[in-house]
Structure formats: C-alpha cells, structure tokens
Amino acid sequence: MSDRITIIEDKIISSIKKWDMLPDGCSVVAGFSGGADSVTLTHFLWRYSREHGISLTAAHVNHMLRGEEADRDERFAAEWCGERGINVKVLRADVRAEAARKSEGLEECGRNIRYSFFRSLSGVNGRIATAHTLSDSAETVIMNLAKGAGRRGLCGIPPVRDAIVRPLTCITRGEVEYYCGFYGLRYVTDSTNLGDEYGRNKVRHNVVPVLKNINPGFESAVSRTQELMRRDEDYFEKKAVKLLSDAEKGRGYDAGVLRGAEFPVLSRAVAKLFADSGSGRFGFGHIEAAVKIINDGNGSVTVPGGIQCTVGGNTLFVTAEKPAQRQCWRVRLSLPETRLPDGRIFSVGKIEAGGMKNKEKFHYLSFNNLINYDTILTTGSFVRSRASGDIFKPAGRGVTKKVKKLFNEAKIPPFERNKVAMLECGGKIVWIEGFGASAEACVTSGTKNAAQIIIKECS
C-alpha cells in the first residue's frame, strides 16, 4: 500500500474518531450520488463498517432533472452497491414539480428532499454521512466571504451537525480522485458540474485555481482558518446561551439584561432565538434590526418563516406565529370550568359573602381576579378573544376605551393578543385577562356573591 493512500485513510479515521462520528455498532446512511466523492465515502465506510460492527445503507435520490443521465446514475448506484453487497435505497422525486408547488428554488428543494429521505432511513439514533470534502468547504468559505458573511460563515462546512457526519471534510478533491484511482473505483460525472452556470462551479473552476497558484496549499490553509473560526464561534455560542439563560423572563427575555451584552454575544443570542423558533432564512439585517429594538426598548421585527420579534414592557418576545394565533375564538362559558382552544382552563370559583369578609383586606376595585358572580349568570356568557371594535370600561378608571388601545398601552405583543381571554356577558365585555373586571361587573362593598377567575395553563 502506498504512503499516500495510508495518509489519506489515516486522515479520515482520525476525523471520525476526533468528532465521534461513528461509534462502534451504530447504523449509518451514506448519501450516494455516484460521483467520486460519494463513491470514496461509501467504499471507505463499507470497509470501515465491517471492522467496527456498523450497519451501512447507501441512499440514492434521482431528482428527475437530468433525463437519461439521472436514470444512468440511478442504475449505477444499484449496480455499484449490489456488487459489494451494500444495502441501497433509491428515491425518485420530481424536484421541479415539488419546487413549484412549494415556491422553492430547485437546489433548496432538492436538498430538503434528500435529507428528508436520509432521515427516514436513519431512524431516531442513526447517523447520516455525506461526502462533502475539504475542497467543498473551502469553496463554501469563498462564496460566503463574497456575500459578506460573518465569522460563522467562515467556519465552512462543519464535520458534524446533529446526526449528520462528514468524514471527508479532512481531505481534498484531489485526494478523493487518488483514492478512487488506487482502488480502481468507477464513478459517474454529473454534467452540470462541468459548466459555469452555478455559482459554486464558477468558484471551483475560476477562483480556486488562482488561489492555488498563489498558495498550492490553499485548501489546507483554509482548513486552519476554519478551525480557528470554529473555536471562536464555540466560545461566543456558549456566551450567548448563558446570556439567554440570565435574561429569561417568563415567556420572554429581559431586554435590560440583553442590552448589557456586547454585540458579538447579543447578535448570536438573537440568531439562536430565530433559529430555535424555526426561521432558517434570516440574515444579518434581521439580527441588526432585532438588536436595535432591544437597545431602543420597543419595536417589532418580522423574520422570514413567520417569526415575530417584539420588544415591549422591557421584554423581548420571539415567537413563531401559528395559524391558531391569528384566528379569533369564542367558546360558551361553562361553570365551574371552561376549556379554551389553546388548552388552558378558564376556572370560575364562587365566593360566598361570608367568605369574602374573612379574606385578607384588599382594594375591591384593583383585585383583578374577582368579579361579581351575579354578572356571570347573565344569559349568553362567552369566553373569547378580542374582536374588531371591542370596548371596555375598566373598574375604577371612569373611562371607556377600545380594547386595542388598552393592549397598546399595556405593551402586549401583537402575537400574544389573540390569546388574551375576555369574558363577555349579555353582549358586554365584563372581564379581561390581566385587566380585571369592568366597572359594571367589579366587586364592591355591596356585592353579595363574588367569583374568582383563575386561568390554568395547560400541562
């Protein structure tokens, strides 16, 4: 065996062990396109798996975008894996039709379909191995740099992300081709990789050769930069997680605590909130806008993916708006308990006159969980969300206000407003969650029977 192949294989093994990619006895799904990268990956894993008790499955996706060439690749995958006794699964997906249906780009749609297929095969605890190389990672850094990426974008393609492992990010494309040549491995070539239609191809064919001319070890140099960037990024990520923990305040985050953080930490904390809420398309502009409203103490930012970022009452809320949150709701009041659409329980407990006298002293007008029980017995009582044109006369304030104005004054975030429960009796709003009873329904010294309203969160 040549020294070079030994070096290549030792690099891959070292990377697998360093990142704990493939524990002995695990199962792994290898993405197999049929190109040199995936052939190298699958061939290496085929050999490695037998020594470490690993269950290997190859997965091929025919995107149905390249006609006969795509069908050729599908046949090749079945034949190549069959020759070695490797279990292979094939998915045929009309990516063009699916992209049109979802209003996604072809590349994004294809990637989503592939990874969804891989996850369906890997199960809960399995690994997914993809054939990204050090050369791919270097190209990614160049492309991200051209777009003005921050430190995270300059980390390149991570060797491990959740259940996805990339054993070849430690070797170059040239080393992949040497591996295939050494073992006499056949592979297919995707014709779309030969032209300059796509941005990555332009970088690969036109930019990288110039950089290699300047520094033949360009890819290795980028690898060192990526490692330094990852270490820095890990440090700031830990700081961001601690910041969010320190700032946590009910369903939101204390904006005052967040304002005390330096921008590198705060920006990462905001990015984490966006990502955890389900937004995968936010950019630096969204992060900057969110940081601004945190520093200003109020405002709202909408992030792609239906994410609403709002600061009100010195609290930051980042919420994924769901259809149910936008809809109005209305349920008939049942005593003593009414289940609300969001799962909470609206509980009404009657307090007899004698019981009221024995309670600790309280100001009848401001104790906002109490209401005149006789009001509730009015025909046509409902618990509902806000509606356009709602008005309310808060007890003790002597004025009638629009509910919208009350919510604005209380700085209730827009995405929270349809969740606020309101009690309507006889066509009038007599109690609002967080505001208490109306002037007509409040408890006074002359009240005979009172009721205490408690809303229990769903468990």
Image (cartoon, grey):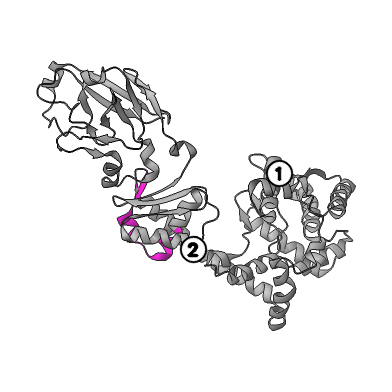
364 inside magenta stretch: no
Q: Is residue 356 visible?
A: yes
Which three-letter amino acid code belongs to the residue tagged 2? Phe
Which residue is identified by label 1? Answer: 117
Which image quarter: residue 243? Answer: bottom left
Residue 297 against residue 399 in the figure, above or below: below
The quadrant the C terminus occupies is top left
Observer-nearest residue: 245 or 391?
A: 391
Which three-letter amino acid code belongs to the residue tagged 1? Phe
Please report whichever mark, 2 or 1, sits nearer to the chain's N-terminal start.
1
> x, y percentage for residue 203?
70, 71
* Magenta region, residue range: 249-268
Q: CA distance from mark 2 to mark 1?
A: 31 Å
Q: Is residue 119 left or right of residue 458?
A: right
Mark 1: which secondary structure? helix
At 80% from the left and 44% from the top, the residue drawn is 90
Which residue is identified by label 2? Answer: 284
> x, y percentage for residue 212?
71, 79
254 inside magenta stretch: yes
Residue 135's disc number: none
Mark 2: which secondary structure? helix
> x, y percentage for residue 403?
29, 39
Which image quarter: residue 353? Answer: top left
Observer-nearest residue: 191 or 438?
A: 438
